[in-house]
Image: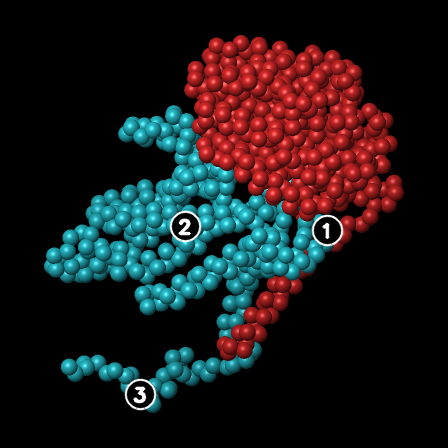
Chain colours: A red, B cyan
Amino acid sequence: MSSTTTRAALSGVALLSSAALLAGCAGAPAPEASEGAPVTITVSIDAGLEKEARDNFDARVALFEKANEGITVEAQEYTWTAPTFTTDLAGGTLPDVFTIPFTDGRGLIANRQLADISGLVAALPYADQFNPHVAQAGQAEDGSQWAIPIAAYGQGLHYNRTLFEAAGLDPDAPPTTWAEVREAAKKIADATGEAGYATMTSGNTGGWILTTLVNAFGGRTESADAAAATIATDPAVRDALEYLHELRWDDDAMGANFLYDWGTINQDFAAGRIGMYVSGGGNYGNLVTQNALNPDDYGLTVLPLQGADPGLLGGGTLAAVSPKASPAEQAAAVKWIDFYYMAKLADEATAVETAELAASLDQPVGAPELPVFGEEQFAAYQSWIAPFVNVPVEQMAPYTENIFDQPLIAEPRVATQDVYALLDTVVQSVLTDRNADIDRLLADVQTQADALYAKAG
Amino acid sequence: MTQLTPTTAPPPVPEAAGTIEHATGPGRRRRGGLLGWFRGDGPHTLVFLLPLLFSFVLFSWKPIVDAAVMAFQRTNLITPPEWVGLDNFATVLGDPLLGAAVVNTLWFAALALLLGYPVPLVVAVLMSEVRRARGLYSALAYLPVIVPPVVGALLWKFFYDASPNGVFNTIVGWIGVGPLPWLQDQATAMPSIVLFATWSAAGGTIIIYLAALVGVAPELYDAAEVDGAGVWRKVWHVTLPQLRGVLLITFILQIIGTAQVFLEPFLLTAGGPANSTMTVLMLIYKYAFQNSLGGDYGAATALSIMLAVVLAIFSAIYFRLTKSWSTS
């Protein structure tokens, strides 16, 4: 076989393969659905549902389809994760309806990575009844609601009642000031050898919890107009880091492991290796169902607030619609969100049915959350689900009785996750290097944060 | 002293010109051109080659080309990408984390070379001396390689628990060494990771060395023994020179492999504490995937391209320098 023939053959093959590739890549665009035509939407459901939960979901889907002729609902197991969201969206494998955490709402809206359903949302009967602190997470710059809040929580101090008892502390009287937290942490560490207080430090959670602490100390990591980061300028940031430094090196009350993220700190807490830690108030579900926490060990109280203008960082979940959905699909999607997510908050019959099913599946009912609507509606909701509550509410009383007195504030608005990532490094340095120069670390972060704020414009 | 062998090759004998034609079979004329290709083995070759070519182009070449293109664009995978020239490269080169990532990667490579290069050789030499049950020892040596890397990493993460009753701290406690911080301290995190990486990868290299060792002619060892060499002198003067082809290859493979280390720091420390185990590949992952609002795919691909170019240049220089040592 001569070399020219070889080359010709090879180039022919290459051309053929490239042609096949390109043909495969260019997908035909979906035809636009005309008004009144049947529409199909894909909606996200939790992965790995139990059979009864899945049957229940299918029953709800059937009810919805019966009430809405022309809409077909297809379920797709979907879990929102940071690394896969954009690629799912680009690849078209994102369901039409999916849930995202509060922290990403505004950013995704600014990037136009969510559909603008504000007109459809405004038409909902309860559109103006949302708790404003909660609703802002799903709003665009102009205040229009692009994503619907379906659940909300506030940060809390989780503590292990058993370790409290072992250290001679009263589990029904948890610390109410940060000084008391420090004392309790030291007592637990001395008496039991476990970490008295632990904190998340990696995967952007270090910055998240540090920001929570800074807010509880009375400071902010961002200026009020969201124009600049105040990491090196707000004294509360330094105070919070000094506090952690003292807990770690002077008291030796933080144990020996410092590379926690949200999942691993829950694991160690459930295993009884951590006395206290700060995280979202609704963690009880994950602790019990996924980490086998003994419910008797669990206690929850509010974060102590101190300083001139403290605030409680909140979070939650938004339901959003894929920007690739056509207008007809968007309308159907909002109807689904209203039916599936909001009904169990607003409608008594649905709330009771959902709570009853969850209780029968040994899923926690009644874990602490914040009202998505107003407080009276929330109180009514609590009374509806009261017969099915299976979480130890008395152990969470220090939280539930005081949470409404705490001023709820939103996360920093600009480059939130990127700044959290920078703060992760600071927290890890402080906890692993006794001689960490806190001022220099903060100055470094401030410089990098300034660049991020400048880039965001 | 007279040369016993000629210094130059003898001129070709005229009859040799006919043997090439004879080699293809008596009376068989080779036809050039497309027709000859069709009548020959051409179509068969193509049929067998096509599936491989297709999957290679689709899963290897297309992503590489796409990445090279993306390195010069700004894209969030949804809106049409815009061309930004060398901006991504400038961003990457201006990132303070890049310096740390490169230093950490080199540190990992150096430690892995120090620990992971001689240890398999020593173990292979020892195993080659064993007469019985060599198969059993080979299997035991290879066992860590069979453990899926993620499983191994999570196991070792558990063993590396820095509290006094962590598994490894308990073990070193038996010899009186205090509880060590393992992954929780900036100075000891990388060596801990290298320890795990060596454990999980050594088995493969041991098997390769063992196979090469078995091929060394025993007469060489006999000659060395006659000259009065002990075990280690035999290794230094006979084994290593005989193994140099394999050693050269495993060295460059080790360098290329350790330059791309990702799994161990990702699972064990997520780049911490305080970026002391952040490697180049972890930085690429961070650029691409750690921002929930869509990563900087341009920066990630730019860094990937730069890493590939650096490794290619290194390999080229390496093969040039070691040409005289290699056996091929």
Using the numbered discs, state the Cα–Cα distance from disc 3 to disc 2 in whole angstroms: 51 Å
Q: Earlier in the sequence, mark 1 or mark 2?
A: 1
Using the numbered discs, state the Cα–Cα distance from disc 3 to disc 1 in whole angstroms: 69 Å
Residue type indicated by callout 3:
Pro
Q: Is residue A409 above or below residue B131?
A: above
Outermost residue on the bottom side: it is: B14
Label annotation for residue B109: 2
Residue sitting nearer the eye, B17 or A182: A182
Observer-side mark, 3 or 2, equals 2
Q: Residue at x 50, y 19 (%)?
A: A185
- Which residue corresponds to mark 1? B79
Name the chain under label 3: B
Residue type indicated by callout 1:
Thr
Which quadrant would residue B315 be assigned to in this image? bottom left
Residue A234, given in percent of the width and then of the height, sits at 63, 32
Residue type indicated by callout 2:
Ala
Name the chain under label 2: B
- Which residue corresponds to mark 3? B11
Q: Is residue A71 left or right of residue A301?
A: right
Residue A394, given in percent of the width and then of the height, sits at 62, 10
**Helix, strand or loop at disc 3?**
loop
Q: Residue at x 80, y 40 (%)?
A: A116
